[in-house]
Image (cartoon, helix red, strand yellow):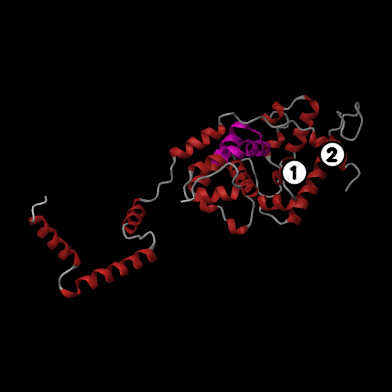
Amino acid sequence: MGLIASTEDSDESLMRLIRQESHQAFAILVRRHTDRFFAGAYRMCGNAQEAEDMVQDAFLKIWQNPDIWKEDKGAKFTTWFYRILVNANIDRLRKTQKVVSGETVLPFIADKGSTPEMQAAEGEEQQRIERALAALPERQKTALTLCFYEGLSNAEAAEAMGVKIKALESLLMRAKTGLRDYLKQNNNPEQGGLYAAR
Amino acid sequence: MQPDDNELNFLLSQRAAPPRARADLAERIIHAAVTQMRDKPRAQNFWDDFMAMFAIPHPSVAVATGIILGLVLGLQASDGLTILQQDWSSFLYVNEGGWL
């Protein structure tokens, strides 16, 4: 039958077995990637409970309907999974009426001092970073998260976000410009330096 | 690249690491998958089961075996008395000799 999964199998091999209803393959895949995807989801949504829900829902979606994984398109499993998470995050924001399409700054950014992410941040510098990131439009923040924190290449991040590489590079550039502007505007003159608090 | 790119990258790298997922998150997902085993529509199940009754695991082997058996049995039956029947008759005859 060939349904015996091994921890040494590639993600793509495990997905083939999951298509044949191998729960063992599913378990290996989940144990292998849960922590990584949780971290990515948390950086996107800033809430541990919601990040857990996003990761769980995404995995169960795969289990229920593994045919959504199109191997012939050549995407790595991890890149493809990030795409599910990115879409889940957009859906989550839409449901909570907190997102407006495109580059509009999100309403919840107006509250710059009390997201769970910020509460978790230790020290003034980390709070400044969280505020600066939270001030970015959602797509710019996602692009930065995927490339900078999740270690995806530009091509992979573009695929995960469903945009062209040029568009992703533009998002990254605008994100960095936005961060610089924010940090300069919120510079603490007493401490000096471009981004202060350091 | 702007001159303060490195500074910005350094600053971003100082961001607090995300908390670790709860230790049992993976196991909860795995368990949830068991309880949500894929359920096919009932009609689809019926037709799958029905068609499975006619499925031959190795069609070529099954056809070849059928042909060989057919030839052997057909040749044996050609004179109206099969070898098996002859063997059975001789067995009865020998038995009449009283060795059983």
Q: Which residues are magenta?
A: A29-57
Of the pair B14 and A46, the residue shown nearer to us = B14
Query: Amino acid type of disc 1?
Result: Leu
Q: Position of residue A198 (x, y in %)?
A: 87, 29
Give a yes or no on whether discs 2 and 1 share a subunit.
no
Chain bearing tag 1 is A
Query: Amino acid type of disc 2?
Result: Leu
Tag shown at residue A144:
1
Q: Position of residue A179 (x, y in %)?
A: 81, 40
**Residue A32 is a magenta residue:** yes
Q: Is B97 displayed left or right of A157 in the figure? A: left
Tag shown at residue A13:
none
Under circle 2, the secondary element is helix
Q: Position of residue B91 (x, y in %)?
A: 14, 58
Q: Which residue is mark 2?
A: B8
> How dense is the environment of label 2, judged by Cα within 10 Å: few (below 14), some, or many (20 and up)?
some
Q: Is B3 displayed left or right of B41 in the figure? A: right
**Residue B20 is a magenta residue:** no
Residue A115 seen from this side: no
Considering only vertical position in the picture, is A123 above or below B12? above
Chain bearing tag 2 is B
Q: What is the spatial separation of the Cα atoms under label 2 and label 1, in whole angstroms?
A: 12 Å
